[in-house]
Amino acid sequence: MEPINDANCGWLHGIEKRNQAERIKGSHTADYLIVGAGITGLSAARQLGKLKPNKKILIVDAQRCGEGASSRNSGYLVESTLNDGFVSNKKLEGYREKTNMYRNGIKAVKNFIDNHQVECDWNECGKYYASSDIKDKNRLIEFSKTLESIDINHKLLNESDLKNRLGTNFYKTSIYTKGDVMLNPAKLTRSMIKALPNNIRLFENSKLIKWNKSNKIINCFFENGSVATSNIIFCTNGFLNSLKINSNYSFPLLLTASMTRPLTNDEFKSIGSPKEWGVLSVRPMGATVRLTADKRILIRNTAEVSASSTLNQKKMQIRKQLHQSGIRKRFPSLSDGIIESTWSGIACRSGNATQIFQKKDNNIYIAGCFNGSGLGLGTLFGEQIANKACGNETEEIKLIEKSKSPNWIPPEPFLSLGIRLRLMKDRFHAASDT
Ligand SMILES: Cc1cc2nc3c(=O)[nH]c(=O)nc-3n(C[C@H](O)[C@H](O)[C@H](O)COP(=O)(O)OP(=O)(O)OC[C@H]3O[C@@H](n4cnc5c(N)ncnc54)[C@H](O)[C@@H]3O)c2cc1C
């Protein structure tokens, strides 16, 4: 899969265009090369620049820096995910550790924002897991017990609470969790580019085509140049597979999202003038829906296996209609045609919803595969993989390394077939909530 971004992301339209982009030309040497300049790579670069001020550190991206999934996501910085099956204490302990890791992720983003005085529409407004089917109430009650036992501040809500808070009577049952943050991902990512230390050199539109290791040096080849580096850190997330890195442990999924223009005052009043909110579906493959601070509605309700990282216009139009129908179901008072932008992005998944954090072969490091929660974990894993590459063992690394690694997954064509079947099943069960 080629890393190609479409030009339609609503978050990116709202921030200023960057004009400078240096490409790799000729031969370079480096002490450290970071491949992939999304949230993870930028966080690794920031930390490495701090720890190794006198070393030569390069970061490269195949596209414009940070304009992949890192700017195209829904902007949920989460403390918890909805998982089932916590029937034994052992599993509960695993969930507690996972939550602690998410909390470290939130802390890492918060520290970054405070240290660099970043403005990214940060709102500690929590999030909702909601369903339009009252049958999901029992599942949420069970989940509430899990949250209770690991001290996650939450509240079960019914239809009328939800109508007041969200401005729609679509949802019948929900859990509100308090510790999550809504933000603007493009503003966050852009601020990470601005915060790169001076000793970091950034190359864009420079795709790593192939690489090999000879003696202790890693030789990396680009269209118009090369880099010979003593250490390499791979932060290419959904594109790890394309570089044949940990191919049997993660896979890319193509997601699409749409964002409306800001609602007019009348439209906003027609939905009850609610405060900013974010809803995740109780059912896998159900819709993620947000009302942003500037009164836009964002919806993401598709996920698919794809050979390419963008969709042609016709396919994108079909996804947009699905987004439109999702908005119509929730907000019948709003007219069609208010969607302003529709885009795609590549997320990285593993079979068992775990992440990759790995030192491989002495001077090769990998961080990625965040299963749709990369805002916090990408920042955390990026900073910590830089620590790892410098030989610093931290408490955060201990916690990350304690968690499970991704399961082995079968090669193609079995992989795509298996994912398609799973997505089809999830889509069927979530049909009412897309
Ligand atoms: C639509 C959507 C909604 C999401 N919603 C959320 C959310 O609400 N909350 C959340 O936490 N997460 C969410 N995610 C996931 C989140 O966006 C990712 O986990 C996060 O962006 C990962 O950051 P990253 O830096 O690891 O990867 P990316 O942002 O994907 O960056 C990887 C970079 O590597 C570059 N690259 C790839 N191959 C090469 C190569 N050969 N040479 C050089 N560079 C290369 C790419 O161009 C890219 O810029 C969502 C994702 C999508 C797509």
Image: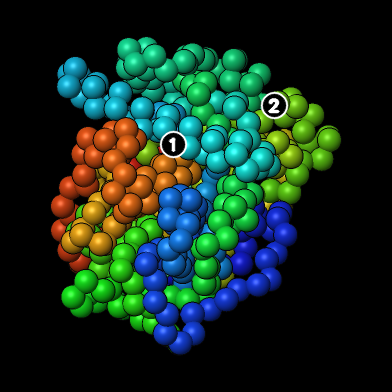
Query: Where residue 27 appears, x then y in whole percent?
Result: 42, 85
Q: Is residue 290 left or right of residue 416?
A: right
Task: Choose mark 1 or mark 2, whichever is in front.
Answer: 1
Label 2 element class: loop
Number of labelled discs? 2
- Within 10 Å of disc 1 (Cα), the crowding (few <14, some 14-19, many 20+) is many
Q: Quadrant of residue 35?
A: bottom left
Q: Nearer the viewer, residue 60 or 338?
A: 60
Tell me, for residue 275, which label it has, or none: 2
Would you place residue 80 above or below residue 394 in this image?
A: above
Could you tell me which residue is drawn at 18 percent across and 75 percent down? Answer: 215
Q: Nearer the viewer, residue 185 or 113?
A: 113
Query: Where residue 115 appears, x then y in whole percent?
Result: 60, 39
The answer to whether residue 299 shows anywhere in this view is no
Tell me, for residue 105, which label it has, or none: 1
The answer to whether residue 208 shows anywhere in this view is yes
Tell me, for residue 276, which label it has, or none: none
Label 1 element class: helix
Query: Where residue 63 appears, x then y in whole percent?
Result: 51, 70
Amino acid type at mark 1: Gly
